[in-house]
Image (spheres, helix red, strand yellow):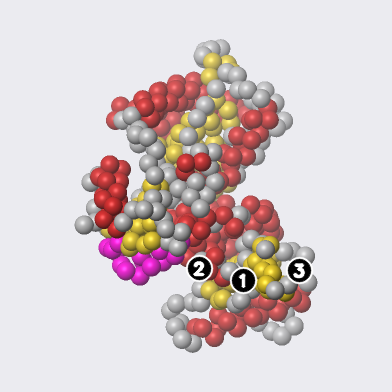
Amino acid sequence: MSANSISIKNFFVYNSLLGPKEGEEQKKILFFYPNDTNVDVQIRTVGLCEAIVKFTQTFNPSKPCEAMHTQKTKQFFLQAEENYWMILTVAVPYSVVVEDGQQRIEYHGDDVQDNVYLSILRMSYLMFRFFQGTIHSIFTVSDVQGVRQRLNHFYSRYLLNLRLDKADLSDVFNGIYFLPLDKLTFLKVQCFVNLVEATFSQVKYIVFLYNEQLVWSGLEQEDMQLLYRYLVSSLFPSYMESELNLGPLYPTKAGTPSFSQAHYGRFVTGPKNLNDASDMGKVPKAHVGVEAGEQHCHLIVYRALSASICLLVNSSFQLNMEFYKKLDVFLGPQMTSLASEIADVNSKKSNNVSSEQQFKYMYFNHVNLAQKSTMKISSKNSANIVPLSVMRLLADVNSDLRSVGNVGEIFMKSASGNWVVAKASDQRELYVFIGEKNANLLDVNDEVKKLCSTQFENIFTVD
């Protein structure tokens, strides 16, 4: 038996008002992937989606069409902005089965779950909006061709990095992993952040992370969610890969005679070499506070050991090498010291952690977008690996749990004999996978209660 995995068949953005007349159908297409698709095919594909959207509106005008299923594909619809639609078409995975010498194709439509891929589609738009602004705002400063260039510039790279075959429940939540610290250490981080804001008036917002876990943020939740996803899924991995290729990291001296302390600080976005004024590096622009009034900021990311700080600088300020050197002098030594102190606190905490349990869990808080999980499809620690089939089952349970309401619980035994438990209470959700096949319902319930009392005491209770 051979099989293929979930993949993108096409992705496109259109506005029906841009090509309302016959013969102008191509004008309404702002972006189409794959970009080498025949124009006639693009027009027919977009036209079919237009028809589906208009037809379904007759049944419920207030709730647009979200998905259409066929045997070979599943199509997901998002009205990103007024009159602007984004469509993601996913090829359903299939396997070739040989029976009695004859080949037969079996399509696995259940592997492509609506809640997962609708979330991926929505996130693709939000990430575009975070780095490029709304499509409407682009139109205020550019023409249709300018919009097409912005869409192409962003999505031609973004779509290549999507791993649809690895999508799971975490893509539904897109949560933020927080790092809990003791009061004294957290106070030191907060004082440091306040000192940065007072020293550099150009900085509008600050975010502080350690080991890809959030410690402090001055951003609104939705902006922080998007920035966090960009950092942990794109920027930090590519930076770490480039650092590994360069070899071991050695401490450097700060840039002025008054600061001779060595530190391990480096710019992740910005200049790689502070002595080379000809290369200022790349600094992306972020569009924050879109709902309350869009603001443009330079996104400067600086890292020392495992600590990272994101500085969102007013876009009206002209970045220059002198500014970068001042930042390096100020941030490098203090962040190196903070990183070492947080590492000491974490090492003491990890020594008190109990041995690995046989159940894995995923927790999400809708109020502050906090996520905590010991589930991984692939992981350096094999003990954390959960089968992909179980992760897909959890996504199905998530849909069922939402239909129950704000409070409820589901206990389920899979075909393989493993247990899956889901709980919802007060805008919080908890999913537990128990690999003990001989456990009964009472045993499972006791294990989940034990987990709630040890890991989520006073913040998650369903009885």
How busy is the neighbourhood of tag 3: few (under 14 within 10 Å), some, or many (20 plus)? few
Q: Amino acid at mark 1?
A: Tyr
Magenta span contains residue 405? yes
Identify the residue position indicated by label 3 in the image: 37
How busy is the neighbourhood of tag 1: few (under 14 within 10 Å), some, or many (20 plus)? some
Look at the image and tell me in which quarter the C terminus lies: bottom left
Q: Amino acid at mark 3?
A: Thr
Q: Main secondary structure of the magenta part?
A: helix
Which label sits in the foreground, 2 or 3? 2
Which SS class for mark 3? loop
Sequence-earlier tag: 2 or 3 = 3
Q: Residue at x 47, y 41 (%)?
A: 383
Where 89 sits versus 165, above or below? below
Residue 254 pos. (x, y %): 56, 18
Residue 107's disc number = 1
Which SS class for mark 1? strand
Magenta span contains residue 169? no
Residue 388's disc number = none
Residue 333 pos. (x, y %): 49, 20
Q: Disc 2 vs disc 1: Cβ atoms closer than 8 Å?
A: no
Look at the image and tell me in which quarter the N terminus lies: bottom right
Q: Amino acid at mark 2?
A: Asp
Stretch of the chain drawn in magenta:
393-409
